Image (cartoon, rainbow, N blue to C red):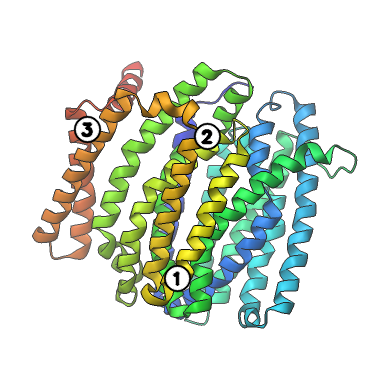
Amino acid sequence: MKNKSLGLNAFLNGLKSVLNLLFPLITFPYVSRVLEVRGIGIYNYSNSIVSYFLLIAALGISTYAIREGAKYRDNRKQISEFASEIFTINMWSTIIAYILLFLCLIIFINLRNYLSSILIFSVQIFFTTLGIEWIYSIYEDYFYITIRSIVFQIISLILLFILVRNKNDYLNYAAITVFSSVGSSVFNFVHARSFVNIKLVWHFSWKHHIVPILIIFASNVAIMIYVNSDITILGIMKNTYVVGLYSVATKVYTIAKNLLSSLLIVTVPRLAMLMGKRRMGEYIEVLTKVTNMLLVFTLPAMTGLFMLSKEIILIISGHSFIAATPSLQILCFALVFSLFSWVISDCVLIPAKREKLVLIGTVFSAVLNVVLNVVLIPFWNEKAAAFSTVVAEAIMMIFNIYFAKDIIKNIISSSKFRRNILSSFLGCIGIILICWLCDIGWQNMILKTVFSVMLSIGIYGAILVLLNNSTIISMLNSIKNKFLNK
């Protein structure tokens, strides 16, 4: 199969993520004002409960399938056999997830207060499995994924404004969220026939797949614990009002993180393929570009988000959520740790089949996160949950760097990487000054935010160019060459 352009894939996936960014920026201000803090709290608490069972259904299948499937994608027969085996395992894990969910609803009486919303969200479990999204990552088919996302986001947006009209319509909001997932999954399954012939199979070597899948699953469980335990523990120890405040902060943080990771996630199948075929020279070259690009974009995103946290909260959710500002500012620091940790785990350790080492770091981080939540939430509420996330992400990044040091040491110890860090750091100082000056110069919140963002981008880019940042210079040269070739 001909390799697709990483630049084109990054653009398409970035476009999809921009749309994913714009969609909540349009909908969440409306939804948070209509449903108010309590409705948002119920929605997010129910979603967090179902997410655990979504994880059980997913196992570690997507990560494993992308890593192993990338080796077979040039042979339709081999990839069809592989995909059918993985899909069969996924269907069994889905059945187990539903059984466990219904047992929990029977055993834990307090969950019955959220029964309707939990049952609505649970529909996603089956259809996420049916969606076989990993097939599209293996084949780097980001054009289809982007078009599909646009269509279902537009439909969901229309339904949202029609069906969510007052504070009791949180079930309608949940149903619209599920509709988007269900529709995408059905189209995915049908369209996947252009790549593979997928079906349920019964006679194959389960052990060959199940051991690495379960190791990756254990890591995913640990990650889920320190991602979702915040909201779950807040819901248990506090109330839906506190959950609602924290949900807004995590919503903004997650949007920023997903937007940044989308520009780089397209490299995961390519890196898995290069590592699997032992083409290490090309692998290191791509990984170096990914690492430096992540550095250039993540540091200013963290700085800008911190400086404009109050304005972003007010624009997105209104004055009733202003108390969420400190927790968002704390979460900003997790942005760098989380993204670098993700790159090392998904682009280095897992392609190198070191998922057991990823498991060690994630388990330790998850346990630490839960302990910090239990100890600190009674005193600091949602701010404690944000702080525990930062600590857990930082510890996870340290573990991953240590376990991957033999592969990445030449990248992170290079003078080029150090120069990029210095230039990005100085660029971030420019962002701080710009945001401070805009805060003094504009009283109108919208104007202050718009000019802060535009001028920050300008000053940051100018500083990087003046300091000869290799990543930004390379990007500008690439753009210039494309225009000259036209």
Q: CA distance from mark 3 to mark 2?
A: 26 Å
SS under mark 2: helix
Q: Closest to the observer: 279 or 74?
A: 279
Residue drawn at x 71%, y 33% is 195
Q: Which residue is mark 3?
A: 464
Is residue 319 visible in this depiction of the protein? yes
Q: CA distance from mark 2 to mark 1?
A: 34 Å
> Residue 322 at x, y = what percent?
30, 72
> Residue 245 at x, y = what percent?
40, 72
Q: Closest to the observer: 114 or 425?
A: 425
Give the left or right position of residue 109, taking residue 455 as reference. right
Residue type beneath disc 3: Leu
> Residue 339 at x, y = what percent?
43, 44
Sooner in the amino-acid sequence: mark 3 or mark 2 = 2
Q: CA distance from mark 1 to mark 3?
A: 42 Å
> Residue 169 at x, y = what percent?
53, 78
Residue drawn at x 22%, y 25% is 468
Give the left or right position of residue 32, taking residue 204 as reference. left
Labels in figure, total:
3
The N terminus is located in which quarter? top right
Residue type beneath disc 2: Cys
Residue 145 appears in which quarter of the rendering? top right
Q: Which residue is mark 2?
A: 347
Sooner in the amino-acid sequence: mark 2 or mark 1 = 2
Mark seen at residue 22: none
Q: Which residue is mark 1?
A: 375
Residue type beneath disc 1: Val
